[in-house]
Amino acid sequence: MAKKKIFISSVQTEFSFERQALHEYICADPLLGKFFDPFLFELLPAIDQRADSVYLKEVQQSDIYLGLFGKSYGSENESGVSPTEMEFDQASQWFKTRLVFLSHCDDVERHPKEIQLINKAQDVLVRKKFSSVDELKSAVYASLVRYLEEKEIIRIGPFDASLHESASLSDIDQEKLQSFVRLAQAKRGFPLAETETAEKILTHLNLYNNNRLTRAALLLFGKEPQRFFISSEVRCASFTGLIAEKPIPSYKVFKGTVFELVDQSLEFVLNKLDYRVETRAKNVSIPGSYEIPKEVVAEAIVNAIAHRDYTSNGSVQVMIFRDRIEVWNPGSLPLGWTTEKLKQLHTSVPANPLLAEPLYLAGYIERMGTGTTDMVRESVEAGLVEPQFIQQEDFRSIIYRPSSLQVKEQVKEQVKEQVKEQVKTVVQIMEHELSVIEMMDILGLKGRRNFLQNYLQLSLAAGYVEMTQPDSPNSPTQKYRLTAQGMALKLFLQQRRDALK
């Protein structure tokens, strides 16, 4: 099926950043990018035609007109009409789907002709206001999902934006919603008062439409979210050693809204970490710090809950080991992304935008794609081993405790003592869980016995590799993965190679 073409209007400089951000967002989002092809006038190559004839023709050939109306009216032609108004009129003449989004400002700040244009659109369109590019993305996302549903291009919308078939406003916890508003006002200057109706607040957040709640509304503010979504929980466990094995000293399953899941999971982890109390030398109060910066742990947990795949029956898992913390979630990176990109400055493409926006407004997450880079920076500044991100059937964040530095030093000593080259070879090919056949294929080896004796068994015995099913060593679905010691060796070998370049 051919993609639906979106004409992103408003060529004036007022929205140059927002228009570019929308174009990138729609192209990168796994759902929107599959169904929509956004058009920006600036991306056209230079051609020998009048600009107005070109963009009006593009409007005519598009399926959707997306207009951004703000303070300025824009340059006027000899008839006193701006390009934005001509585009809107063209879209109306050709009966295009028209989506108009208004910047959040008072009418006294708008050009008189811009107010007239807004009034012209008012009678035929449902308008949404935005005060930031992320609010704009969230509103556009919700509108385009509704377009796909109304045109029956998709019959089931993305999880967070889909309307729940039976829930009503009576399933929303008014106290939780009011608490959110107070927090969002303090953190981000949320424009609505806590005395506003739940309907108005949820509509502003794109969580309520046509008298129906989105699934995101229930996850964020529901009285009992797990009554609707049973897998929306976090399982936390603490182990004494380096691997997950019974008996488990501490195990909890947390339920509640996404805000409560974050708070409860974070408290569970912090209670297991060492806390160092300092002196009053420079402060009246007694300062202190956790062995891992609190912000690093919080970021990993929030990311797992906000970006997980809620259609999966799996749950978010947080596991504490002697040398590390692992946070797993049933989800995946955006199409074309790699785990290395997470360690660099990158755009923000949330898997669940309608969940992510309230989490941002409440101060639980930041924008601009800095969360994972902050995790890396803050860990390194605290003298810890750099966190690792792994994409397999699920997504994992691995945060190393100070004790992992001892493992790293042990690895250096072991390398000095000449770890067998076959073991180094196995460690360096392990990007994710692999079976024996997969490892042999990567290495180009044919003899199974030779591989088992001279490669795999040596790696297992040295503690660099472990079984995914240690209780069933001969299972036909058995796979192998790196231990914390193996990850440290792989990182050491990579750093050494880089130093020699």
Image (tube, rainbow, N blue to C red):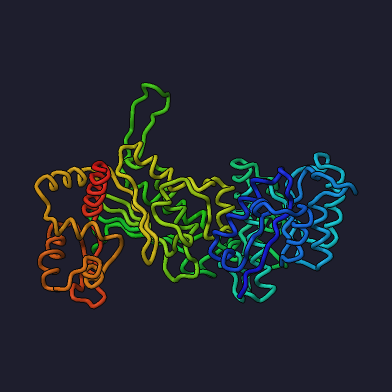
The image quadrant where one finds the N terminus is: bottom right
Specify whether residue 324 is in view: yes
- On screen, residue 381 versus residue 333, left or right, reads left
Percent across and percent down for residue 202 are 67, 58
| Residue positioned 52% across, 50% down in the render | 347
Which quadrant of the figure has residue 173?
A: bottom right
Tell me: residue 443, above or below residue 294: below
Percent across and percent down for residue 36 are 62, 65
Specify whether residue 479 is in view: no
Which quadrant of the figure has residue 162?
A: bottom right
| Residue positioned 61% across, 76% down in the render | 155
Which quadrant of the figure has residue 389?
A: bottom left
Query: What is the residue that sits farthest to the top in this orientation?
Result: 281
- On screen, residue 252 versus residue 176, left or right, reads left
Percent across and percent down for residue 118 are 83, 52
Query: What is the residue that sits farthest to the right in this orientation?
Result: 79
Tell me: residue 155, above or below residue 67: below
Query: What is the residue that sits farthest to the bottom in this orientation?
Result: 476
